[in-house]
Amino acid sequence: MRLTIDGRNVEAAEGMTILAAAKTAGIEIPTLCYLEGISDIGACRLCVVEVEGKNELATACNTKVKEGMVVQTASQKVIDARKTVLKLLLSNHNIDCFNCEKNGDCQLQKYCNEYDIDTTPYIGSRSLLECDVPKKDAHPFLSYDPSKCIYCQRCVQTCRVATGRRAIKLRRTGKYTIIDAPFGEDWEETRCESCGNCAQACPTGALTIKRRKNYRAWEVKRVRTTCPHCATGCQYDLIVKDNKIVDVEGADGPSNHNMVCVKGRSGSFDFVDHPDRVRHPLIKNKETGEFEQATWEEALDYVAKKFTELRDTYGGDSLAGFACARSANEDIYMLQKMVRTAFHTNNTDNCARVCHAPTVAGLATTLGSGAMTNTIEDITQKSDLILLVGSNPEHAHPVLGMQIRRAVHKGTKLIVVDPRDIDLAHAADVHLKLTPGTNVAFANGMMNI
Ligand code: SF4
Ligand code: SF4
Ligand code: SF4
């Protein structure tokens, strides 16, 4: 389709929104509630644009392009409407930027600056509601402050659509719809799994990760890396202040698309600066039995000497090297290289072959390689049916579990074969609760059918 946006000729595919078409032409339209692929509810109305021939402004995030459409994204009418939207949002907002964790990283603040709004003539009716909706702060990692909420529903949509958890709800109280965040005293009884993806999606300081109060956006740098916890391989940014990791934010990696789980977000970096961490090589004093601090040169010379003595006295097969599953492929490669070239042995292995020995052997025998044979998208976006046998991805690989939940909510059938009542079993079309020990009979039965 051909249309005109701000006087430019733009080509767009049928079904595209004005927002997406404008983006392809390098025209940015401001949004607060929109999240690509997750939420296009058009609630904030900041993305309004003028469409020739229409009296009312259209929301660009959910209005589809049409052949010959003429769109203005920054006419005076549009700018005036956006200013009014921002003033109305501010009328219910506790403007406390100086103390706010999101100062410098808040999209409401950003757009108010861009549209030159620093105050509002309106008095918001929602402020009357605050006594009914107290701050929810009992959760160990997350906090919700309704006085800063703009009711954009990004958190609700993220929890509902992206993570498939549905722990944050919209609730009616009187004439208002409010955000029912699961971070009160009863947080442990809620469905929340503490992944924090809602806080990452929140455009304001309403729903935050508590550790954000320790830094401001301009004090930190980002370091892109891979989560070390499980094999999902989520990409995230370490947020670093004064050379210390202070937070984690999900990045758009092929396996996680900005999401992370509770392990990645809140359990993957505290140890780096933990006071109990061993920071120097230690060599045991044979006389006292105590470990004593050594330099790296002393420690490496000592181990190299001992390994060489063992190899020369008893042969290379007296030694072995075992790599940690949390190591990067490159480090594991270096370890096996050292074992083969310096130890003169092939006794080298990795935890992955212990934990996954049966799957590795089975996959290698049938398919030639003991590794995952499909992308996550093949499983969660291109399958009619998922057969889950003896696996609890919501615990073991939570971001994959989130994507399976999302697929099931979108209509993919799920069969869980597991003696345990894993959470996914409740969403399954069939839960086959095998008697432990009958796995082989199940596999044979399936092959027979
Ligand atoms: S932390 Fe995760 S599960 Fe809990 S409410 Fe937020 S998005 Fe939902
Ligand atoms: S808590 Fe944040 S994401 Fe949720 S509705 Fe309020 S402003 Fe939007
Ligand atoms: S699923 Fe969780 S633990 Fe696994 S890589 Fe992703 S963030 Fe890390």
Image: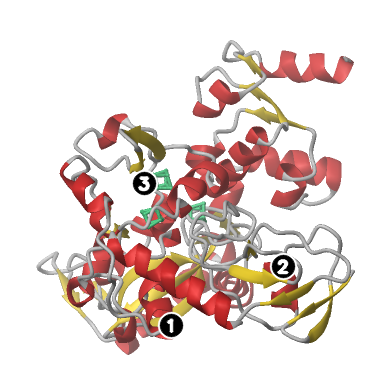
Q: Which residue is located at x 19 percent, y 77 percent?
A: 98
Residue 88 visible in the displayed image: yes
Q: Which residue is located at x 36 percent, y 64 percent?
A: 88
Q: Which residue is mark 3?
A: 194
Residue 144 visible in the displayed image: no
- Which callout, 3 or 2, points at the residue further toward the start of the chain? 2
Placement of 365 over or under 154, stated as above or below? above
Marks 3 and 2 sit apart, C-alpha to C-alpha, by 35 Å
> Could you say whether the residue bearing mark 2 is in a helix, strand or loop?
helix
**Horizontal arrangement in the rendering, residue 341 relative to residue 151 (left or right):** right
Query: Alpha-carbon neighbours of circle 1 within 10 Å: few (<14), some, or many (≥20)?
Result: some
**Mark 3 beta carbon near ligand 1 (under 8 Å):** yes
Marks 1 and 3 sit apart, C-alpha to C-alpha, by 35 Å
| Amino acid type, mark 1 | Tyr
- Which callout, 1 or 3, points at the residue further toward the start of the chain? 1
Q: Which image quadrant: the C terminus?
A: top right
